[in-house]
Image: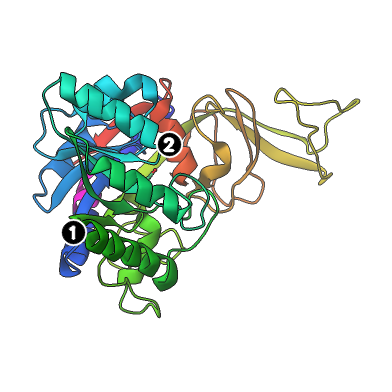
Amino acid sequence: MYPKLMIDLDKLTHNTHYLVNKMKHHDLSITAITKLYGADSRIISVFESFPEIEYFGDSRIKNLQTYQHTHKKKVLIRIPMPSEVEDVIKYADISFNSEISTIRLLNEAAKQQGKTHRVLLMIDLGDLREGFFEEEEWLAAIAELTHMTNVKLIGLGVNLMCYGGIIPDAANLGKLVACCERVEQAFNLKLEMVSGGNSSSLYLLDKDSDATLPPGITNLRIGDAFFTGESSLGTKFADMHGDVFTLAAEIIELKEKPSYPIGQIDVDAFGKVPKFEDKGNRLKGILAVGRQDVAFDGLYPDDEALEIIGASSDHLIVDFTESARDYKVGDVVKFRLHYGAVLQAFTSQYVTKEYIG
Ligand SMILES: *Cc1c(COP(=O)(O)O)cnc(C)c1O
């Protein structure tokens, strides 16, 4: 039963209403990104019920496969592996690309399956994860692409924040729009998707923000923000819930123990030399949850007086000393989760899921 990830579908529905309206107000098409929760079918059903969401996107074909029955267009948002092009054509309507050699393979695979596959080119505007970097290179790719029989260019996109921590703003997103105008003129075509980033671009829709989303951006790809109510810059939309997800874990040991280990210190189970501060004896508890379940540095106890002091594969060590509550073995402690913790909780087979609503 424990550790358990509780998923509040009512709060998620409320959040989705709010964000979808906000994006529609800015004439944006919406791609709901499904990788954070491993394309969980109950969560997918919530998003499926919103007609404003036109696309479902994921980095993994395996996740796209699980919702082939939905009416949303499926988008592979990670650059395809050359070895998976047949499945890309089979399971994705659109894929994001940055290598012309892979696009050639997609064209061949699409020809074999008698399909037309739609591609969006990713442009790297400084975050230094995926995307064409040199303008000559993407212009040459488009020139070649427009002559291919079974792939069609539908737009350009950018990803920011995830690797380099680069903030989406009017300058870099304006550059993306300028690239699109350049392509439309040079190749005499109309691009239907100008995809201006992930949840971290949402702050540009906030009326209180100094910066605004440049006109010409037509799409955003949103995962995280539906669940946190935050843009990745730390602003939170006041009308959204931040606690769609809660992790619950059970106390299996609770004892007064020293804060400083006894004996000679070597590396821990993960190859790091641990550091300790001697605070004397503390009331320390062990929860039955560990690194095999969740990224523990992304956990925030509901009881703010608790302090997470460490974790091994299956144990979370918590300092209970400062709490006013009277805990005992068998009690359940709840946590809010940050991005990495949610990601891992959904990936672990040891975490039970419970749905509310
Ligand atoms: C993960 C991802 C997203 C979604 O990011 P969130 O921060 O969850 O909104 C969007 N685009 C790409 C390319 C991604 O890899």
Q: Label 2's element?
A: helix
Q: Residue at x 10, y 44 (%)?
A: 49
Badge 1 vs badge 2, beta-carbon distance below 8 Å: no
The image quadrant where one finds the C terminus is top left
Horizontal and vertical percent position of residue 344: 46, 32
Marks 1 and 2, the one that precedes in the sequence: 1
| Chief secondary structure of the magenta portion | helix
The residue range painted magenta reads 9-13
Q: Horizontally, is 339 left or right of 262 in the view?
A: left
* Residue 43 position by quadrant: top left
Q: Quadrant of residue 253 in the image?
A: top right
204 over 187 or under it: above or below: below
The crowd level at tag 2 (other Cα within 10 Å; few <14, some 14-19, many 20+) is some
Residue closest to the eye, 74 or 174: 174
Q: Please provide percent x and percent y for residue 291.
A: 56, 28
Q: Which residue is mark 2?
A: 343
User: Label 1 crowding class (10 Å Cα cut-off): few <14, some 14-19, many 20+?
Assistant: few
Is residue 298 something one can see in this rendering?
A: yes
Instruction: Determine whether, in the image, residue 175 is placed left or right of residue 327.
Output: left
Q: Residue flagged by tag 2: what amino acid is it?
A: Leu
Q: Nearer the viewer, residue 282 or 183?
A: 183
For badge 1, the amino acid type reads Asn
Quadrant occupied by the N terminus = top left
**Residue under label 1:** 188
304 or 289: nearer the eye? 289
With 127 as the anchor, is 54 left or right in this view? Answer: left
Q: Above or below — where is 6 with respect to 17?
A: above
Instruction: Please name the residue shown 16% across and 58% down the image.
Output: 190
Determine the residue positioned at 76% across, 31% down.
272
